[in-house]
Image: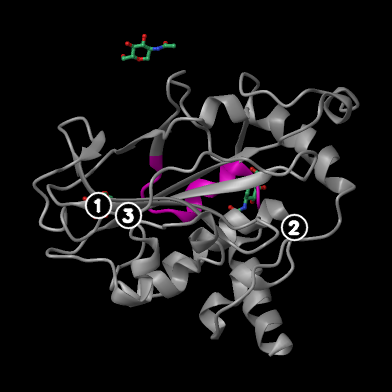
Amino acid sequence: MKAIQSIAVFATLALVNAQTPSNFSDVSPNPLDVQLNPTNITLSPGQLVSQNDVQDSPSLALSNSSNVNYVAFMIDPTSRSGTYLQWLQPNLIADTTGKLTVDTTATGASSAVGATYDAPDPPTDDYAHEYVILLYQQPANWAIPRSYSSINPPPQTRKRIGFVMADFQQAAGLDAPVGANYFRVFNGSPQATSSLSAVPTDSGAPATASGTLATTTGSSTSAPSASSSSGANTAALRFNQSPSQAGLMAVLLGLILV
Ligand SMILES: *[C@@H]1O[C@H](CO)[C@@H](O)[C@H](O)[C@H]1NC(C)=O
Ligand SMILES: *[C@@H]1O[C@H](CO)[C@@H](O)[C@H](O)[C@H]1NC(C)=O
Ligand SMILES: CC(=O)N[C@H]1CO[C@H](CO)[C@@H](O)[C@@H]1O
């Protein structure tokens, strides 16, 4: 099993090759525009943002959307206890500018509720966690698969733990994502934060934030490892990896699968 996972990992790494935000758009055919609320910060892929800036669910937009429904996910594949489902928002529809809002008349509106936005709250002084936002086209008359009724909506926080995007995608009959983006959040205590060469900030350029993060994560060696699930499809979400690669893994997986 380990060997199979390693092969999958190497294959994936070879395809991605680089983890810089500037390479992120290569992974998604149609990058997802993400604007944080209420600051209106336009997210650069992989940008380090402050926890305060992601208390509200972000606004999403797809530059070349179609007149169909979409379903959005936000996951933390770097969570130590297994990939965490932060948000599942079905029944989205784009306006003429591509901005996505909830379509209350969507065919899945009554059956597919999703999971309310659970704002990022990584453990204090843990590495910067990654929050990956994925957008899929929502098939007509779509419903959350019965096997996932515990997240529609999740009655308890623990129902969000161990969410395997690839498994859900398959069970729910979703095609590859049509858009993706991600941000990072470092929840530093004042002490730890002040010891960094630069305080993580959402106002700096992504390149600066990235450099800061490398320092931060360099000392936190234990890598996240999500539990549960079987099959090579999910290997990339479970193997030990550096947090900075997890987001790309998740997105790439979605594109490779289906
Ligand atoms: C964000 O955009 C909205 C709508 O355009 C505007 O009303 C609001 O003042 C903006 N907020 C900030 C902090 O710029
Ligand atoms: C978005 O644009 C790309 C490139 O023009 C195209 O291949 C793709 O089908 C478009 N996606 C949608 C949802 O229209
Ligand atoms: C696979 C790929 O496109 N890699 C590129 C990522 O970005 C760096 C820096 O811009 C390039 O040097 C790589 O070739």
Up the image or down, 162 lies above or below 24; here it is: below
| Disc sitting over residue 212 in the figure | none
Mark 3, secondary structure of its residue:
loop
Report if the CB atoms under discs 1 and 3 are less than 8 Å apart. Answer: no
- Could you tell me which quadrant the N terminus lies in? bottom right
Residue at (48% x, 22% y) in the render: 41
Residue 221 drawn at (x, y percent): 86, 56
**Residue 64 pos. (x, y %):** 24, 42
Name the residue type under label 1: Tyr
Q: Residues within 10 Å of mark 3 (few under 14, many from 20)?
A: many
Q: Quadrant of residue 176?
A: bottom left
Which stretch did the figure color magenta?
A: 19-32
Q: Residues within 10 Å of mark 2 (few under 14, many from 20)?
A: some
| Kind of residue indicated by mark 2 | Ser
- Tell me what residue is drawn at x 87 percent, y 30 percent: 192
Q: Position of residue 10 (x, y in %)?
A: 68, 75
Q: Which residue is mark 2?
A: 242
Q: Is residue 115 above or below residue 61?
A: below
Residue 134 shown in magenta: no
Which residue bears the numbered disc 1?
70
Q: Which residue is mark 3?
A: 114
Side of 17 where 231 appears, left or right: left
